[in-house]
Amino acid sequence: MVVLDPVDGSTNASRGIPWWATSACALDASGPLAAVVVNQATGTRFEATRGGGARRDGVTIRPTSSPTMGRSIVALSGYPRHWLGWSQYRSLGAAALDLCAVACGQVDAFIDCASRPLAPWDYLGGVLICGEAGGFVAEAFGEDLVVRDHESRRVPVAAATPELLAEAVAARLSLEG
């Protein structure tokens, strides 16, 4: 199965904001197998294969080594009700590209804070790329991120390090209740 988002960041695309992409992720019985995310505004191409690492425009990428939210730049989808402890934040508007930004060290973490969780086509390509680059990705509520059901929604969180991921997940959970 291939999960495709032809225009991830459609609002950005409609407004001429150069942060929107086409994202595709091939799934097999074991989960994400191969992914490509292309920023259609700039032509920047991210790709990964399971066990094969991740690349931006053919060059191997790695996330930063930021260990804490207080020292991190965090990309957000949506905006939280309160400050989550970041040093700085960016709300960029295209989840697949935001996850790729974690993968290549443009930001240190990504937290989905939107009022409606994301669909699998919004994030699966970026999840494989981020993980293959050496980043860490989880679903905030412990659910499986790899879903094949069109109606399923999840809350992805990604970070450069395991310590930062734990802090980012805890920050996201602090928005509940």
Image (tube, grey):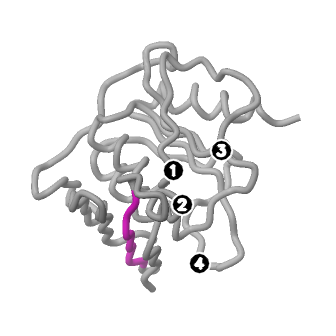
Q: Nearer the viewer, mark 4 or mark 2?
A: 2
Q: Which residues are magenta?
A: 20-27
The secondary structure type at the circle numbered 1 is loop
- Residue bearing mark 1: 93
Q: Amino acid at mark 1?
A: Gly
Along the line of sight, the residue nearer the viewer: 61 or 6: 6
The secondary structure type at the circle numbered 4 is loop
Q: Nearer the viewer, mark 4 or mark 1?
A: 1
Estimate the x, y position of residue 45 in percent, counting from the top left. 22, 61
* Mark 2 and mark 3: Cα distance apart in space: 25 Å
Which residue corresponds to the image point at 23% horizontal and 39% vertical from the top-left?
62
**Magenta-span inclusion, residue 24:** yes
Left/right of residue 120 with respect to residue 128 in the rendered view: right
Which residue corresponds to the image point at 59% horizontal and 71% vertical from the top-left?
147
* Label located before the other in sequence (1 or 2): 2
Q: Amino acid at mark 4?
A: Arg
Question: Which labelled disc corresponds to residue 140?
Answer: 3
Estimate the x, y position of residue 39 in percent, counting from the top left. 30, 60
* Label located before the other in sequence (4 or 2): 2
- Residue bearing mark 2: 11
In the displayed structure, 129 sits above or below 14; it is above
Q: Do the residues bearing badges 4 and 1 touch, measured as CB atoms within 8 Å? A: no
Q: Do the residues bearing badges 1 and 2 touch, measured as CB atoms within 8 Å? A: yes
* Label located before the other in sequence (1 or 3): 1
* Mark 1 and mark 3: Cα distance apart in space: 19 Å
The secondary structure type at the circle numbered 2 is helix
- Residue bearing mark 4: 148
Q: Amino acid at mark 2?
A: Thr
Q: Nearer the viewer, mark 1 or mark 3?
A: 1
Left/right of residue 172 with respect to residue 164 in the rendered view: right
Estimate the x, y position of residue 61 in percent, counting from the top left. 20, 45
Which residue corresponds to the image point at 23% horizontal and 54% vertical from the top-left?
54
